[in-house]
């Protein structure tokens, strides 16, 4: 189904002590304990996981450093963390706790000097620039920060290039209107950004199934990410942790 170079990345949302999954950045469904979830993904030989603390972003709180260290100590795969980072000391502490990369979103708008310093001191391969995008009435797609609550004045392509110019190693695009909906990736958006920057692009938002992740690669993404597709099963969205590598070993699609 997938070529070796095509990374498949679960995106998990940390809200307080537990993991949740949202739909269009709202209506979170509780999934369970993050450490237990990491242990399950260990058995499935996951490529990597992105962990986003949505409460830290929303409430402008610092990262849960001890909680994150406990999670990292359990993981047998690379981890990236995003949420509430505005200081180089905090970003460095996240890396020291066992995370390979940090994910930055709102700080590109609110703390640009911090982002520049972090990219320079920690290195491009350590920093992922994230951008949340959704359609705007009569205006085309727009970029939003602060957990999707505030629009920036720069267009999608210019914002992606701005992120690249900060020195990030990769850009993650999240289609907000498809978050948790499992209706398919916004391949036009992926192609637009991927063709506008030289760094690799991670596509996120709308993955309908494991086989349905392939269009993201065809649109130019170097990695396909998702949330609901990894944690829900069936039309009633029962909580079940799953990953395509394990599915392939079982002979399924």
Image (tube, helix red, strand yellow):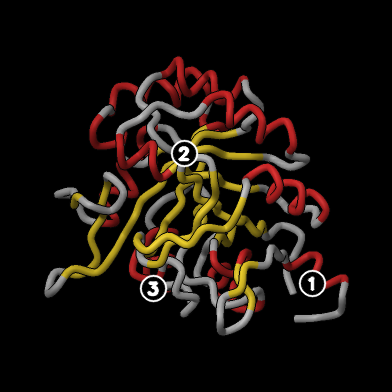
Q: Give the spatial CA distance, label 2 vs label 3.
A: 25 Å
- Quarter-of-image position of residue 94: top right
Q: Is residue 27 left or right of residue 35?
A: left
Single out the residue that lies furthest toward the bottom. 235
> Which element type, helix, strand or loop, lies under badge 2?
strand
**Residue 28: x, y in percent?**
42, 60
- Quarter-of-image position of residue 66: top right
- Residue linked to disc 3: 188
- Quarter-of-image position of residue 163: top left
Q: Is residue 73 left or right of residue 220?
A: right
Marked residue nearer the N-terminal end (2 or 3): 2
Q: Residues within 10 Å of mark 1 (few under 14, many from 20)?
A: few
80 and 127: which is toward the camera: 80
**Residue 195: x, y in percent?**
42, 60
Q: Residue at x 55, y 77 (%)?
A: 208
> Which element type, helix, strand or loop, lies under badge 3?
helix
The answer to whether residue 145 of the structure is visible from this angle is: yes
27 and 208: which is toward the camera: 27
Marked residue nearer the N-terminal end (1 or 3): 3
Q: Residue at x 40, y 67 (%)?
A: 23
Residue 247 is marked as 1
Instruction: In the rendered view, tell whether residue 221 sits above or below residue 95.
Output: below
């Amino acid at each position: 189904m997938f070529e070796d170079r095509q990374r498949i990345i679960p995106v998990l949302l940390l809200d307080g002590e537990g993991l949740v999954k949202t739909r269009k950045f709202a209506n979170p469904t509780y999934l369970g304990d993050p450490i237990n979830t990491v242990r399950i993904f260990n058995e499935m030989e996951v490529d990597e996981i992105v962990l986003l603390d949505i409460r830290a972003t929303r409430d402008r709180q610092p990262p849960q450093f001890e909680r994150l260290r406990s999670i990292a100590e359990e993981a047998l795969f690379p981890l990236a963390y995003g949420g509430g980072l505005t200081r180089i000391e905090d970003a460095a502490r996240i890396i020291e706790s066992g995370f390979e990369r940090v994910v930055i979103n709102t700080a590109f708008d609110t703390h640009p000097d911090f982002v520049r310093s972090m990219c320079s001191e920690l290195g491009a391969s350590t920093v992922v620039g994230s951008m949340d995008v959704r359609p705007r009435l009569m205006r085309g797609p727009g970029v939003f920060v602060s957990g999707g609550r505030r629009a920036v004045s720069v267009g999608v392509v210019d914002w992606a290039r701005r992120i690249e110019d900060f020195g990030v190693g990769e850009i993650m695009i999240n289609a907000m209107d498809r978050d948790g909906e499992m209706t398919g990736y916004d391949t036009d958006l992926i192609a637009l950004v991927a063709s506008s920057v030289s760094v690799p692009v991670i596509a996120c938002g709308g993955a309908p199934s494991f086989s349905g992740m392939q269009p993201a690669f065809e649109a130019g993404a170097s990695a396909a990410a998702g949330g609901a597709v990894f944690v829900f099963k069936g039309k009633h969205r029962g909580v079940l942790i799953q990953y395509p590598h394990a599915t392939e070993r079982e002979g399924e699609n």
